[in-house]
């Protein structure tokens, strides 16, 4: 009984202990679960608030395990730091991985090509599949060094990379100094051209060579032209004010000159050429003062050629008004500039003397007219043959021509150099130049040249038309190039025709868009669209079918907005095969549309605007004052030293001429302004022969002993 009682007590104790242990385990489990859930919740909220949604949170007791793929190492570190704000950082277990940037995003492939006088440099990153040796071979011309600083990455070649790289290397060969940036599908060319014409040719050549799938960014610049002489000519007459020539050194100066012209009464917006060569920084100030003087007079013209200012006022202006305006202008001009003012009188009747030269568009120069003598005739003929291909020289001598006639004739011939075709007519009181040129500044060039060659006082009249097709700076295509463009587009197009019909099959839109760009500068050429077929069918049927298909192409071009007034359609049928008709491939080649140039000369006369007649006077001729001492300079102080005997030193040798203005010798002063030479003086310089000494040229012999002894005695007396 007692044993049974002890057994019951022990069992009860075990049961109580087991229950207590179970309750303790359940409490601990509940506490641990609570801690884990709370830690997971707090860390998850902290990561989501910071934008780290890619991170997963798992708890293992007190440990917090972070998993997931971080976009970068920086994002992984930020996630760990953010989790440490919610729980103790020692409890965090970092099991996150970092995504490979190289595997996610391909690198930016780009090449910078620098070309200069020292050589070429290649900098950038290219795909590993790029043939770098081929690049270097293509860029290494004779005697020029190529520096290879390229890096390679083992990634697939992106779309457009091959075409862009090929065109970029081609652009490097077309430029002398350039920076070329090459990226997939994009090429940027920043180059320096020699002049305006070279800039236009280079831009046109690069655009033509660029593939359709490559975006081209051109930044071609040309240095400002050097204008010599730096010229501005403002004229005001019954038609209002205008510029015959206008040059400015910078934008601010150009704005000041333009504003002065508007204040003087010029209606249309004037244009000035920016260039180098201004005689001083206050060029715009001098030009504005001169323009204002003409505006105050209401008529007349003023010419600035470097630092010379020539004001020419017609006889209709009173002498008093002329003197007042000329005096104010002389005071307003900067110190560097010199004013020459002329009040015109009634012109004398011109003598019936004339020289004329004609230059046809395609041919040789022909001349006729009067020349002073045989020597001047030979000078004019030699000058003309040095500049032109002379076909006929009908010159005759006439001693009655006025003085300076040969200089005027040569100046007129030299002014013809600005023309592609035209005529010059020289009379004693006028030089007329008419023709056509591809230079938009041909009139300015001709006027400036006449002013430089003839000096002030020469009248001229210019009527030069600008033909844009002759302007090399525009790079316009000729007829052969236009036809070549059209044939290339047609060969690359997907335009077809229904079998045995003239209906166009497929979408002609893309091809017509290319035709629109190609015909933008080609509409004035006479072009034929010729249709051709294979030998299947009758000859008459093929001829009519080919003509209908050619007409369908021309009609589609007209519907696309292309001017087809100078285009014609013709069917050749099977008469002109370019491949065999025995195979299907050959017959497919023979079924074609070909464009052919009918005439190399453009037909539309509207492309050449009517010339604007420019008349003017190069300046006012100023007669030198005979009373003026031409050897003036600063007065020198008296020479210090011993008193010399009052007699002139006897110099040995031939007697030298003395100045008429003074009895003694006057020292030459550096900086004295050169006096202007008249046309007679310039023509006289043409007559002076140039002699070269040879073996037969007489030379002075030794002095006699008596003369040498006398000179030695005088030297000893001078020393004493």
Image (spheres, rainbow, N blue to C red):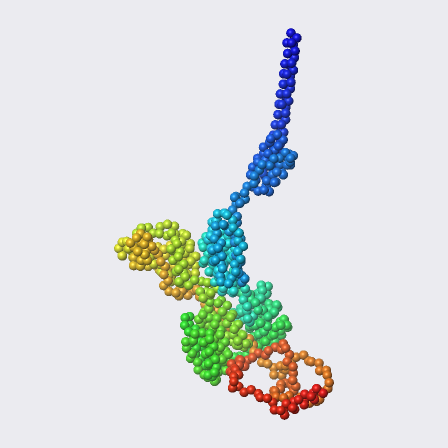
- Residue drawn at (52%, 79%), measured in percent from left and top? 347
Give coordinates of residue 230: x percent, y percent.
Answer: 56, 70
Q: Nearer the viewer, residue 653 or 4?
A: 4
- Name the image quarter holding the N terminus: top right
- Residue drawn at (46%, 65%), measured in percent from left and top? 471
Q: How many marks?
A: 0
Relative to 715, does residue 419 appear above or below in the rendering? above
Relative to 420, does residue 623 appear above or below in the rendering? below
Give coordinates of residue 625: x percent, y percent.
Answer: 61, 82
Q: Is residue 545 visible?
A: no
Give coordinates of residue 238: x percent, y percent.
Answer: 52, 71
Q: Nearer the viewer, residue 451 or 60?
A: 60
- Name the image quarter holding the C terminus: bottom right
Residue pushed farthest left? Answer: 538
Relative to 710, does residue 153 appear above or below in the rendering? above
Give coordinates of residue 574: x percent, y percent.
Answer: 29, 57
Residue pushed farthest front? Answer: 3
- Residue drawn at (66%, 79%), measured in percent from left and top? 633
Q: Nearer the viewer, residue 470 or 664?
A: 664
Q: Is residue 636 visible?
A: yes
- Residue drawn at (52%, 85%), measured in percent from left and top? 695
Residue pushed farthest bottom? Answer: 706
| Residue 224, image quadrant | bottom right
| Residue 25, image quadrant | top right
Residue pushed farthest top? Answer: 1
């Amino acid at each position: 009984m007692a044993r049974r009682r002890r057994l019951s007590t022990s069992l009860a104790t075990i049961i109580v202990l087991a229950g207590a242990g179970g309750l303790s385990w359940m409490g601990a489990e509940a506490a641990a679960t609570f801690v884990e859930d709370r830690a997971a919740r707090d860390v998850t909220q902290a990561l989501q608030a910071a934008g780290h949604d890619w991170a997963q949170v798992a708890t293992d007791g007190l440990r917090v395990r972070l998993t997931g793929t971080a976009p970068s190492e920086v994002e992984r570190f930020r996630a760990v730091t953010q989790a440490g704000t919610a729980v103790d950082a020692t409890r965090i277990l970092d099991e996150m991985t970092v995504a490979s940037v190289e595997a996610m995003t391909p690198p930016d492939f780009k090449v910078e090509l620098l070309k200069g006088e020292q050589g070429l440099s290649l900098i950038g990153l290219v795909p590993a599949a790029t043939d770098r040796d081929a690049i270097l071979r293509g860029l290494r011309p004779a005697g020029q060094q190529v520096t290879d600083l390229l890096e390679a990455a083992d990634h697939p070649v992106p779309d457009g990379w091959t075409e862009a790289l090929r065109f970029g290397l081609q652009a490097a060969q077309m430029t002398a100094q350039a920076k070329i940036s090459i990226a997939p599908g994009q090429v940027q060319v920043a180059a320096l051209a020699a002049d305006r014409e070279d800039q236009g040719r280079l831009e046109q050549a690069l655009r033509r060579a660029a593939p359709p799938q490559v975006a081209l960014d051109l930044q071609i610049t040309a240095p400002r032209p050097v204008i010599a002489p730096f010229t501005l000519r403002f004229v005001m007459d019954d038609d209002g004010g205008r510029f015959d020539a206008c040059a400015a050194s910078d934008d601010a100066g150009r704005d000041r000159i333009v504003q002065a012209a508007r204040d003087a009464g010029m209606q249309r917006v004037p244009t000035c050429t920016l260039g180098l060569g201004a005689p001083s920084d206050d060029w715009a100030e001098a030009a504005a003062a001169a323009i204002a003087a003409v505006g105050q007079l209401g008529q007349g013209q003023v010419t600035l050629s470097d630092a010379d200012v020539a004001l020419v006022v017609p006889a209709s202006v009173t002498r008093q008004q002329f003197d007042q305006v000329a005096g104010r202008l002389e005071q307003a001009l900067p110190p560097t500039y010199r004013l020459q003012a002329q009040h015109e009188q009634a012109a004398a009747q011109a003598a019936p003397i004339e020289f004329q030269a004609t230059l046809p568009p395609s041919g040789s120069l022909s001349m006729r007219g009067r020349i002073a003598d045989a020597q001047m005739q030979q000078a004019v003929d030699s000058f003309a043959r040095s500049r032109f291909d002379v076909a006929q020289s009908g010159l005759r001598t006439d001693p009655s021509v006025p003085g300076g006639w040969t200089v005027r004739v040569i100046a007129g011939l030299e002014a013809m150099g600005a023309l592609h075709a035209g005529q010059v007519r020289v009379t004693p009181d006028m030089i007329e130049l008419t023709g056509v040129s591809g230079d938009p500044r041909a009139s300015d060039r001709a006027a400036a040249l006449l002013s430089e060659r003839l000096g002030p006082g020469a009248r001229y009249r210019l009527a030069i038309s600008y033909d844009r097709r002759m302007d090399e700076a525009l790079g316009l295509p000729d007829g052969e190039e236009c036809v070549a463009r059209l044939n290339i587009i047609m060969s690359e197009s997907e335009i077809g025709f229904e079998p045995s019909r003239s209906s166009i099959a497929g979408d002609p839109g893309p091809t017509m868009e290319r035709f629109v760009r190609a015909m933008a500068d080609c509409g004035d050429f006479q072009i034929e669209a010729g249709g051709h077929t294979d030998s299947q069918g009758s000859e008459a049927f093929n001829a009519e079918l080919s003509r209908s298909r050619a007409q369908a192409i021309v009609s589609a071009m007209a519907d696309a907005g292309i001017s087809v007034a100078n285009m014609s359609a013709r069917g050749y049928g099977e008469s002109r095969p370019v491949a065999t008709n025995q195979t299907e491939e050959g017959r497919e080649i023979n079924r074609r549309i070909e464009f052919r140039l009918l005439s190399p000369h453009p037909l539309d006369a509207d492309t050449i605007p009517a010339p604007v007649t420019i008349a003017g006077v190069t300046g006012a001729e100023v007669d030198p004052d005979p009373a003026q001492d031409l050897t003036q300079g600063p007065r020198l102080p008296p020479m210090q030293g011993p008193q010399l005997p009052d007699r002139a030193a006897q110099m040995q040798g031939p007697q030298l001429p003395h100045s008429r203005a003074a009895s003694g010798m006057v020292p030459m002063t550096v900086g004295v302004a050169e006096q202007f030479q008249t046309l007679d003086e310039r023509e006289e310089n043409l007559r002076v022969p140039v002699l070269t000494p040879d073996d037969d040229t007489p030379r002075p012999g030794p002095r006699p002993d008596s003369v040498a002894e006398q000179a030695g005695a005088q030297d000893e007396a001078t020393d004493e």
